[in-house]
Amino acid sequence: MVRRVIAALAFCNLVLAVLACYDLPGWSDGGGDTCAGYVDEAWCSSDRGYGAGWEASWGSFEDYAREGLTAVAACCGCGGGLRNESNASDCDQTQWRDAKGFSCQDYLELAWCSGGWLKERGTYQDQADAGGVDAIAACCSCSVNGSLDNSWFDATGRNCEIYNNEKWCLDGGYGPSWKVSDGTFADWLNPFDNRSAQEACCGCGGPCTLLKSCRSSVTLRSQADVEAFAATGCQTVPGELIITGKVSDLRPLTLLAVGTLSVQDSDALEVVSLQ
């Protein structure tokens, strides 16, 4: 039995924020079709599968990838996209504007702290306000995501979440979907800091213990799992946090946001509605 939690675990002091999703800016497939087209034509489903409108004779999504990126990685409606905290404005410096006049809400909606940053803008600090305050210091969506794993993107704008979802990498090496024709991770370095996915992304072998943002889904099966996960310092889980088995105390966690929280047959865990 899976009990989908639409309440909160009051004694755990978890503050759960909904993660908003944004399509990868500027993406279109090899034939020029955009995320809107995939959704409108029902070519894909939200669980990363094929939709009712997709014809088997067309082949696979991979046949229409552009620079190795398919709709299921780039488009929210297909199960991909970029995610940020939709309630981030609750703790933003609301009056802050960067050197060009952009606000924290602009950074959130344009996914500038989730792989959508334009290299023409330089670094975040290059766009700081007159007092030297940049988006990482001023904006919640950037302070959670901006300085570590989720701020990294490769030479074509593909971030760590995409590398993980597409199975281009494993913990410390290349994943089953990485093609020899794509070269090496070093061929796709970030244009600012020259880091590769292997150096920057937790799921590719990067420094997980330093991350505030975690890999897309996490399962906690025991109290030992809870303690180990808490020790990583992760504060957001973009996908699903699954709690099962002999978990009884979530107080060690310091989560700020999860995409979906599920409890699976964990009789030791009390679920308290906040209604």
Image: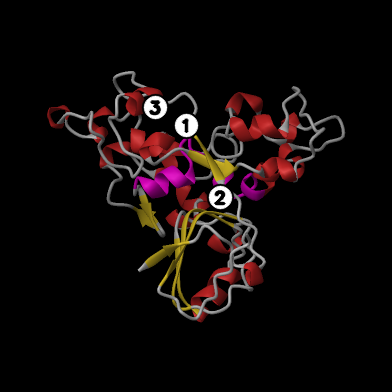
Q: Position of residue 74 (x, y in %)?
A: 41, 34
Label 1, label 2: how far apart the Cα atoms are: 17 Å
Check disc 3 and report its element: helix, strand or loop.
helix
Q: Which residue is mark 2?
A: 149
Asked if the residues shown at circle 1 and circle 2 are in contact, with their CB atoms under 8 angstroms apart, the answer is: no
**Would residue 207 be visible to someone looking at this image?**
no
Looking at the image, which residue is at 59% across and 29% down? 110
Asked if the residues shown at circle 3 and circle 2 are in contact, with their CB atoms under 8 angstroms apart, the answer is: no
Q: Position of residue 137 (x, y in %)?
A: 76, 44
Tell me which corner region of the image, top left, top right, bottom left or bottom right, holds residue 52.
Answer: top left
Asked if the residues shown at circle 3 and circle 1 are in contact, with their CB atoms under 8 angstroms apart, the answer is: yes
Q: Identify the magenta region.
A: 144-166
Tell me the crowding category of disc 2: few under 14, some 14 to 19, or many 20 or more residues within 10 angstroms, Cα based. many
Label 3, label 2: how far apart the Cα atoms are: 25 Å
In the rendered structure, which disc, 3 or 2, sits on the residue that comes first in sequence? 3
Tell me which corner region of the image, top left, top right, bottom left or bottom right, holds residue 7.
Answer: bottom right
Q: Which residue is mark 3?
A: 35
| Residue type, mark 1 in image | Leu
Check disc 1 and report its element: helix, strand or loop.
loop
| Residue type, mark 3 in image | Cys
Query: Viewed as shown, does residue 264 lie left or right of 213?
Result: left
Residue 71's disc is none
Q: Position of residue 90 (x, y in %)?
A: 73, 44
Looking at the image, which residue is at 68% across and 32% down? 105
In the rendered structure, which disc, 3 or 1, sits on the residue that comes first in sequence? 1
Quadrant including the C terminus: bottom right
- Considering every residue shown, the one lying at the far left of the view is 57
Q: Which residue is mark 1?
A: 24
Tell me if residue 193 comes above or below residue 13 in the rendering: above
